[in-house]
Amino acid sequence: MKKKDPISLWQEDGDLSLMNIFFQGVGASLEEKERIKQLALVKLAEEPLGSKTAERGAMTEKRFAGLIFWVLGIAGFFKSLWWRWRWKLALPVALVALVGIGLGIMPNILSRGMSMNQPQMSAAIRVAPDTRGITFRSAGAGSAAPGGGVTGNGAYNDKVQPQAKAATSSSDGAHSNTQQSVANSNSLGPQNNLVTASPPVTDGHVERKLVQNLDVTLQVAQVDKAVEQITGQVSQLGGYIVDAQQNSSDSNSSGRLLVKIPTGRLDEFRGKIPALGKVLNQHLTSNDITDQYYDTQTRLRSWEAEEERYLVILKQAKTVDEVLKVEGPLGNMRVQIEQLKGQIKLFDNQVDFSTISLQLVPVANPNLKVTDPWQPVAWSKTWRSIQDAFLKTISGTWNILNYGLVGLGYISPYVTVLVLVWLAYRFWLRWRHKE
Amino acid sequence: MDTGLSFEDIYEELFPSIYRFVRVRIPKSDVEDVAAEIMVKVWRALPSFRGLSLKPWALRIAYHHIADYYRNHKRVPKVIPLEEMSLGSDHSEQWLTLLSVSQALAKLSPNHVTVIQLRLVEGLSASETAGILGITREAVDSLLYRAKKSFRILYQGFGTAGGGQI
């Protein structure tokens, strides 16, 4: 039914006149009217006179009472809220709890996001020195062409940057010096250590010292078989295995091999790799250690020359005192010489043997091996799981509740502000009312 | 606003409405006191009166004062049924009808009675009533509409359906 004017609705059944009659009957008698008037006049007369002075003094007292009244008012407000909404109150409470949970989780997400960013930042920072190191190396030692044979004198390639050229030309300048120092090494002291080393020239070009590393990822039919084959080939080529690792599980197995192969036969080995399986990834790097190598060698030679000189002096020594005086420095020299020899040996090994790292992964096998198909869970474990599940639900519920409470903590500043604003509004209303 | 009216004038003009309003809401023992307080309040607030019609404004004061009364006495506002009232006339037939009306009103919600009284008896407009109750005009209309429905049911429930013939 369409709503019509409520007044005309009330006219139906004579209800409107009924109301008018009723409320007229409610009217006051003349005596009553007069009594109330006198009462009002009395109130009018006593309040402004009696209270104006007393009011000032009572003001603070009143305010304090007012404060208590407001506190009671808030309690009353919540009480009336409850009476008004009853169970529907659960809805906003749940909303608040949800917001609380959301707020409770938010800081977590934020902090996680921050910590996610930080490693990236530091990684980016870390990259910078690395690249600098690389450019430095390529500038100092010329271009280390990957796989570039020992044939070309890499540093004198067309690709060489001007910077590198400058470096090589300066080392050329130093080179003649060293030639000299090597020639006169008999009469030179240890101070010629300062002379920069430079590679000896054979037929106008330098023999470059390159450390070669090869990384290969191979997909093979059977990992253990491939490992066997590789082991055989390595020993056949005169190499050796540094590290071998093999995992096997029902559905997946893998292997890792670290082998050393004589550098001269590296290409031969590389040629044989495709026969073992599918090459998924291959990465060859060459590290040019020419500068370090010849520097070490020059230092060794000069120390050896020094040692020879001291030996000559030792032969001429006559008193024990003189012998001891010469023996002291000689001991130091021998330690240095041994260290440098070891270094050169290490370099030689690195140059003579290339490091190959092989990662073996199996071909994905469509026919999965099913092992141990019958694995029933014991009753005792089921019972334990039931217990654990029960506890987990309880603790989970508590945790959610906890989130809610923490969330309440988060929103409490807002609630406080709202309550304060509300109180201020109430105060203002009351104050205006009093005015 | 200086109305130039004396307390006497104001009293004569507003007393009937105020009294009716108070009478059905406040227990008999307090009626005179509360009515007098409201009149004093109205008189005091008169200088700050801005508007055209005094009656809605005075009734608003009365409405709030009664709300304060109930709040201070920690009681739920209610409409006082006839048992506590003494109606002037004792024509038995009319008296019985009015008794039924009173009982029906006492069963209605206080808001419904207020809307009935303001709109139907005091003749306030819907927006004036809305202003006093702090609700919208549409809400006033729908309250009045629902009050009618409820009143009819309650009134007939007292077995005096024929009371409407008066």
Image (cartoon, coloured by chain):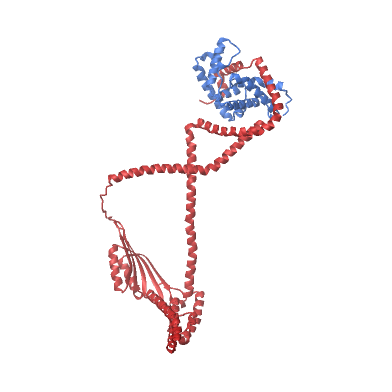
Chain colours: A red, B blue
Residue A208 visible in the current orientation? no
- Relative depth, front residue between A86 and A132: A86
With A254 as the anchor, is B30 left or right in this view? Answer: right
Q: Is residue A196 above or below residue B78?
A: below
- Residue for point 63% across, 35% down: A428
Q: Count up the numbered dots.
A: 0
Horizontal and vertical percent position of residue A313: 44, 87
Residue B47, position as x, y percentages in the image: 71, 29
Q: Is residue B7 left or right of residue B105?
A: right
Residue B78, percent across and down?
55, 23
The residue furthest right is B4
Displayed quadrant of residue B20? top right
Residues B156 and A304: in front is A304
Residue B7, image quadrant: top right
Residue A37 lies, with reference to residue B138, above or below; the image says above
Q: Identify the image quadrant of the C terminus of chain A.
A: top right
Q: In the image, residue A278 lies at what x, y percent?
A: 33, 64
Residue at 50% in and 77% down = A167
- Can residue A121 be seen in this snapshot? yes
